[in-house]
Amino acid sequence: MKMEEMPLSSPDNTKLEALMHDIYSELVEDACLGLCFEVHRAVKQGYFFLGEPDQESMKEFEIVDQPGVDIFGQVFNQWKNKECECPNCNRLIAASRFAPHLEKCLGMGRNSSRIASRRLARNNMSKSESDQEDNDDLNDNDWSYGAEKKGEPNQNSPRRSKSLKPKNGEKVLVKRSKYNHNTGISYESLGPEEVRSLLTMVLCPSRSQRCPQHTDEQRRAVRVFLLGPPALHSAELESHSFDIPDGQMSRLQWVESPNVSPSDSASSKASTNHPDSRRPKKKKTLSLNSGGGSGGLTEGSGSSAQSSLSLSSRKKKPKLSAAFISSIYDDLN
Amino acid sequence: MSPAGCPHVNGFKVDNWKQNLRLIYQCFVWSGSAETRKRKAKSCICHMCGTHLNRLHSCLYCVFFACFAKKHIHEHAKSKRHNLAIDLLYGGIYCFMCQDYIYDKEMEQIAKEEQRKAWKMQVLDFDFDSCVGIGEKYSTWEPTKKELELLRHNPKRRRITSNCTIGLRGLINLGNTCFMNCIVQALTHTPLLRDFFLSDRHKCEMQSNSCLVCEMSQLFQEFYSGHRSPHVPFRLLHLVWTHARHLAGYEQQDAHEFLIAALDVLHRHCKDDNGKKANNPNHCNCIIDQIFTGGLQSDVTCQVCHGVSTTIDPFWDISLDLPGSSTPFWPLSPGGEVSVLNGESHSTGATTLMDCLRRFTRPEHLGSSAKIKCSGCHSYQESTKQLTMKKLPIVACFHLKRFEHSAKLRRKITTYVSFPLELDMTPFMASSKESRMNGQYQQTVDPFNNDNKYSLFAVVNHQGTLESGHYTTFIRQHKDQWFKCDDAIITKASIKDVLDSEGYLLFYHKQFLEYE
């Protein structure tokens, strides 16, 4: 029977109310008793007063509310010397300068991307310049080399030729360069341009692609010497557009290799004398190359690095090769 | 023997005393099953006066119940020399020789075990299917003997009272990072988030040490360490920039953007705290979602057939347009609505937060150029769209759109918007809208419905222009104390300071938290 349904003026009602009151007061009393037991136990076990704060600590952590000081009672702006360790480069940086440092350190933000894109742009022109490039815009000396700090008279090519040439006992640091002597690079993984620049370095220690001492032909000669015919073929075919029937291509390769190594005078002469002797000579040359050609090659190549080579222009190349083979024949015979 | 025990129990601890004691606890003290409850109710009466009440005790040596209040149990003890009795309500053991309740280690162990058993049984006895299964009765922490010793030897206590600086700490500006500092202050003073981290609830699943939630946890430790010098949040900055690349860069950022990015990264890193895989964004149960995620209902009503298409999207904040922006603010709605909640009137002239919310939830007529395909009419029709709150988050963040980046101009809108200390979100709920549509125009305030009542606890302000400015935060501690956090400087503030400030990000916390 619900409470709400009971009529208010019934004699049972007072009994019910009394009962309700009894139950209610019992519940309250039981709850109070429970609390008493808790406190009693805590006191008897000895941990009742343990959590009470001590006066000293209360005073220490009190809030201060006065002008000129913060809630800890400290004067404003006394925290100039805070430092922190950069998680990226582990250097100790002043706290108020941490954000700009981190931006450059991680290579993000607009400044860094500007530097990076400029670096990439110059990388195509000259590799030596690129190494020094990002030092220009950085305030902090993140990447400082001993070479960089020397005074440079030449403004057009700053810090270029002098500092990068290895001198006695001086190390040249190359930052983020693929062309590290210590790492083994497989030539297959490099593109033709990269191969070109890589081998240029071998020829000339100045590591410049525009070194005035050597010509393109000389560089090409070294390339072929080191890489052999296939690489040369692919590099050369890209630049010329002469028609070679497919079947002839392999033979042409064979033919072309001895072409590079010989002395210049002989080849240039040969080209002018025998412009059309290409096709008939091929069969001969193929057999020759499989046998003694390699021997001739080695001999020829031994001298190539030291002597200054000059080859005729690329357009004449096919004819040149054929003609030249005949001259080798002549020499050998 | 501990000081809480007594030597007189030794007389009791003979033969099969443990089993006897267990039996007493099971039958007469902690009644687990309905059967034992009945038995207790029937048989436990004072053998001398017949009462059920008055602190009934049972003799430990024989089967005798008597009340304490009328000293009937004392008489029994004296006459029979049975000097131990047990209180049938709480299981405490009384020694008549010591004339006090005593606490014997072995006997207490038995009592605890029996209580746990009875509690578990009680839960199983419930017959409603949605019983959570409490399982374990909550017991307060009690120090062990070793701990007691340590605590006695070290009397210094760091206790958080209302006049205490613990929990407050300045943050060093790392170079235009006030946008980060202000959000960190707001988050560290979000009560639920604080409780989550201080109770060490985050269990890190990440292999590397680049978890932002761990860093957040560390941040709370720093704030509650009692240190007075400002904290240098360099690790936090590094982690945020690593995980939210679009924010990286040494330039001035928007605090609101940072808040959303930070919540996003925290949410992503938080996934497995409840032991559930949360790949589905709708079912994530991480602390961030529990606190910050609400549901926004969008109703598109076709003007022709009046069919309504409803979608509910999750949200972490509400961005509100302001008067003075290029988007039209007044009039609020086709009909115009009046609300008497929050004691407002438009005679003052100042725009209020309620105005902004009313505008946000007004039915908007989508023009003829934006016809929606109606599934009822099977053709493109003009429609009205209305946003309402389907589910309110525990912490509601309101973003006042003060930075205008329209095609024509870029400026900061400095219009003063007054916001209340207490906010009732009832008129903006989806359920309220339904009752409005059913004809109940005026919302009667239900004093017992506390679901939608919110209290302000943090305000982020921006001073300055669009290009360069400075962020500060007002935060609330200990119910009614407010503090201003200006990077490394924390000072006390008045409620008036807070309510008079311009306001950019407003953080409200639900007043009453219900079980789900």
Image (cartoon, helix red, strand yellow):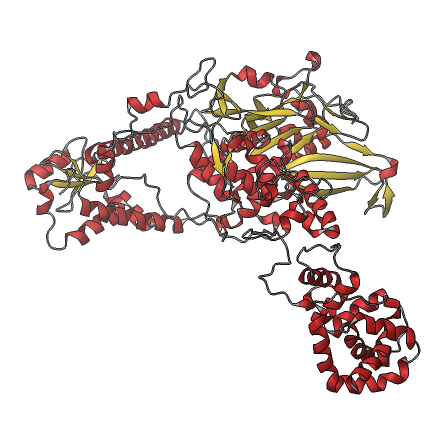
In the picture, which quadrant includes the N terminus of chain B? top left
Residue B392 seen anywhere in this rendered image of the structure: no
Which residue is at the front of the view, A168 or B138? A168
- Residue A197 pos. (x, y %): 72, 59
Which residue is at the front of the view, B392 or B339? B392
Q: Is residue A154 above or below residue A210?
A: above
**Residue located at (83% from left, 41% from top):** B305
Which residue is at the front of the view, B515 or B322? B322
> Looking at the rendering, which quadrant does residue A40 occupy?
top left
- Residue A310 pos. (x, y %): 80, 66
- Residue B119 pos. (x, y %): 34, 47
**Residue located at (28% from left, 32% from top):** A35
Q: Tally the numbered discs.
A: 0
**Residue located at (29% from left, 27% from top):** A52
Q: Is residue A177 above or below residue B514?
A: below
> Would residue A62 be found to the left or right of residue A56 on screen?
right
Residue B69 seen anywhere in this rendered image of the structure: yes
- Residue B408 pos. (x, y %): 82, 28
> Looking at the rendering, which quadrant does residue A62 occupy?
top left
**Residue located at (33% from left, 50% from top):** B33
> Would residue B29 be found to the left or right of residue B232 on screen?
left
